[in-house]
Image: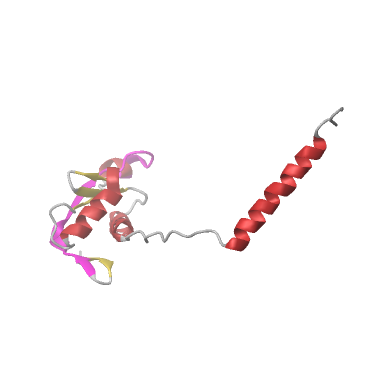
Amino acid sequence: MDDLQVTPDHFIPANELEWRFDTSGGPGGQHANKAATRVELRFDLGRSEVFPADMRRHMLDQLGSRVRDGVVTVSVDESRSQYRNRVTARRRLAELLAESMRMPTARRPTRPSRAAKRRRSEAKRRRSETKRLRRRPELD
């Protein structure tokens, strides 16, 4: 197969993708027991030079438990066709890596406006008044 395009700027060379095929198991009788349609696609993100080192560290952090020893693995056995499962595995790996590349936007701290503070205190005052009116009248 061809190189895997993760983003418009990042491609994974085909020789860095490791494929494994196995029987899918489950229902399907003889076909499921004989045909190696289950696909496992592995990519060693920890050792790959496709991504810069800082981005690679960020991606590994983002992927968390999806990574074992720096290797990202995707398994697909949805279809009875090995080809369709291969296409799905490539798409899922690309989506997974692209999602892990996304850097979180930095939060800019904000303060409530003067009007918001005024509305809040008025609401608290109204609520307090409502509760005060529910009390038992004070006897002098």
Rendered position, 74 above or below 10? above
Q: What's the magenta region?
A: 10-31
Which corner quadrant of the image does residue 15 belong to?
Answer: bottom left
Classify the position of the C terminus by image quarter: top right
Check the image and report above or below for 11 versus 24.
Answer: below
Q: Could you tell me which residue is drawn at 83 percent across and 30 percent down?
A: 136
Measured from the top left, where is residue 126 in percent x and y? 74, 48
Q: Residue furthest top?
A: 139
In the picture, measured across the screen, residue 126 lies left or right of residue 39, that is: right
Residue 6 horizontal side relative to residue 137, left or right: left
Residue 68 visible to the viewer: yes
Residue 10 x %, y %: 23, 67
Which color scheme is applied? secondary structure
Q: Please name whichever residue, 130 or 17, is drawn nearer the observer in this view of the structure.
A: 130
Which of the two residues, 9 or 54, is positioned nearer the viewer here?
A: 54
- Residue 137 horizontal side relative to residue 98, left or right: right
